[in-house]
Image: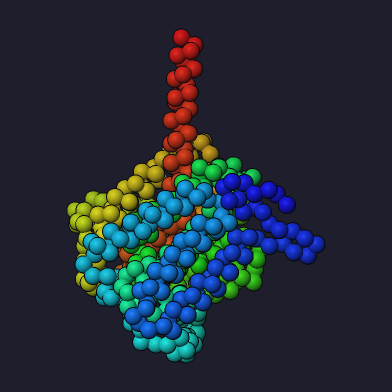
């Protein structure tokens, strides 16, 4: 067995004649069982004790996350967690009404209205094989029943607990999955890169916003990551089970799982073939509409840069749409400008042949995901808006982009490392030049 490194390396897979156990996934399943047991036990106590129960569960989670066997330094874990908590606090303070009770939250109403057994009954009775196959709006509330318990009376922070748990677990799983690819991409084995990636996954405003909103975004992305990583590890039983769960949240999940899995698998040729095939399917689905190509390009750019920074309304601290949903547009616009800048850095590095294989690996996987989102956008544009046009999206771009968040943030982290390496090379060149003179 390999010795453990100081950075909580998770390649320490315990091996025996018939035993092979991945410590991170063992902790993952045991943690979920322990967490849900704690939540359910506190749910049995009087409402007056719910706040104490919430604080005890949250504290226990923080301690366990510090001990989790993931290739992320303790300093990075603390920094990521602190910034995430501050972000959630700011979102709760600036938004005029908690997203748990705003006009979008039919899922919250379902959670409060139905018991777990009722949700299961509604889940099976809502299937329509002629239209949606394996999709039900009751899935999210059913998933959150054992994760949220009776803490809903405590407000937005109660929602942030299970969403934060899912997001931190998915971040650990994603970072470990990349770390295991360090022989293919040495950058992924760099301790400073894994720390940067984890903090970036935790720190950006979109994560804080969706972490306290009773919506599908965080559970959907997290379970997509879990499924894709299990497929990449050839653990097909758990991978397929997770894929079924996430497909019940959104029916196009298989395409998103495929984009994550493509990034994790080693074959560049397969990525090229899948990207070309996805583009062909996208244009076939849109019936070769003349605006499909520019719309696809625009959607890809919006995956990084959204909300639109050119729109003056997006520079308000908070905006409220026609349905009463509040959005922290200023923070998200600044985030989009940052990600857009890192997109340009990556494109320049790709053209300059700096880590070209890494950029192509990321870019092709993102393009496959964007093709899936393009099909989703076309479907909603035609069915909701009644037309398919260039600058009108059937679903909000901010929600579409979060679907590919781990890939987008990984692109950003690689770009930041590229900038840092470029600065060091420039400094080294200057020193060598001075000595030569």
The residue shown at (27%, 70%) is 98
Q: How many numbered tags mark residues here?
A: 0
Q: On the rendered structure, is 154 left or right of 346?
A: left
Rendering colour mode: rainbow
- Front residue of 9/332: it is 9
Could you tell me which residue is drawn at 55 percent across and 68 percent down? 31
Does the image show residue 142?
yes
Name the side, left or right, on which 415 lies relative to 261.
left
Q: Is residue 301 left or right of residue 418?
A: left
Question: Is residue 243 positioned above or below 298 on the image?
Answer: below
Residue 53, position in %: x, y? 41, 74
Q: Position of residue 160 (x, y in %)?
A: 38, 67
Q: Residue furthest right?
A: 17
Q: Residue at x 68, y 57 (%)?
A: 13
Rendered position, 121 above or below 383: below
Q: Residue furthest top?
A: 437
Q: Position of residue 302 (x, y in %)?
A: 35, 55
Query: Foreground residue, 245 or 163?
Result: 163
Q: Is residue 19 left or right of residue 390?
A: right
Where on the picture, by quarter, is residue 416?
A: top left
Location of residue 362 in the rendering, given as x and y in whole percent from the top left corner: 51, 50
Q: Quadrant of residue 415?
A: top left
* Residue 221 showing in the rendered view: no
Give the residue drawn at x 44%, y 84%. Answer: 44
């Amino acid at each position: 067995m390999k010795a453990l490194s100081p950075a909580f390396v998770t390649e320490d897979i315990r091996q025996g004649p018939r035993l092979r156990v991945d410590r991170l996934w063992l902790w993952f399943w045991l943690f979920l069982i322990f967490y849900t047991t704690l939540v359910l036990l506190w749910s049995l106590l009087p409402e007056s004790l719910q706040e104490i129960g919430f604080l005890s569960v949250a504290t226990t989670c923080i301690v366990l996350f510090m001990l989790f066997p993931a290739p992320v330094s303790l300093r990075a874990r603390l920094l990521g967690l602190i910034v995430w908590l501050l972000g959630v606090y700011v979102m709760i303070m600036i938004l005029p009404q908690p997203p748990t009770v705003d006009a979008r939250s039919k899922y919250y109403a379902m959670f409060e209205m139905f018991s777990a057994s009722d949700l299961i009954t509604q889940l099976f009775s809502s299937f329509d094989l002629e239209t949606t196959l394996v999709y039900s709006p009751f899935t999210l509330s059913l998933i959150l029943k054992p994760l949220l318990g009776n803490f809903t009376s405590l407000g937005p922070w109660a929602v942030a607990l299970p969403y934060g748990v899912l997001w931190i677990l998915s971040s650990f799983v994603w970072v470990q999955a990349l770390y295991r690819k360090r022989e293919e991409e040495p950058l992924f084995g760099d301790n400073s890169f894994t720390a940067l990636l984890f903090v970036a996954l935790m720190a950006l405003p979109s994560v804080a916003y969706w972490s306290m909103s009773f919506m599908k975004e965080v559970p959907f992305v997290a379970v997509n990551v879990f499924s894709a990583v299990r497929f990449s590890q050839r653990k097909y039983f758990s991978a397929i089970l997770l894929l079924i769960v996430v497909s019940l949240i959104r029916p196009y999940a298989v395409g998103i799982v495929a984009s994550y899995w493509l990034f994790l698998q080693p074959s560049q040729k397969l990525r090229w073939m899948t990207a070309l095939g996805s583009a062909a399917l996208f244009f076939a689905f849109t019936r070769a509409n003349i605006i499909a190509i520019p719309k696809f390009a625009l959607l890809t750019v919006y995956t990084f840069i959204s909300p639109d920074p050119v729109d003056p309304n997006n520079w308000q601290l908070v905006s409220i749409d026609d349905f009463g949903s509040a959005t922290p547009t200023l923070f998200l616009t600044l985030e989009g400008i940052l990600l857009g800048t890192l997109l340009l850095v990556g494109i320049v590095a790709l053209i300059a042949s700096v880590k070209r294989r890494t950029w192509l690996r990321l870019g092709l996987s993102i393009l496959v995901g964007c093709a899936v989102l393009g099909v989703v956008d076309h479907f909603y544009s035609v069915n909701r808006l009644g037309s398919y046009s260039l600058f009108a999206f059937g679903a909000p771009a901010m929600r579409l982009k979060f679907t590919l968040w781990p890939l987008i943030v990984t692109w950003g982290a690689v770009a930041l490392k590229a900038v840092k390496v470029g600065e060091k090379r420039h400094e080294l060149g200057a020193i060598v030049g001075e000595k030569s003179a």
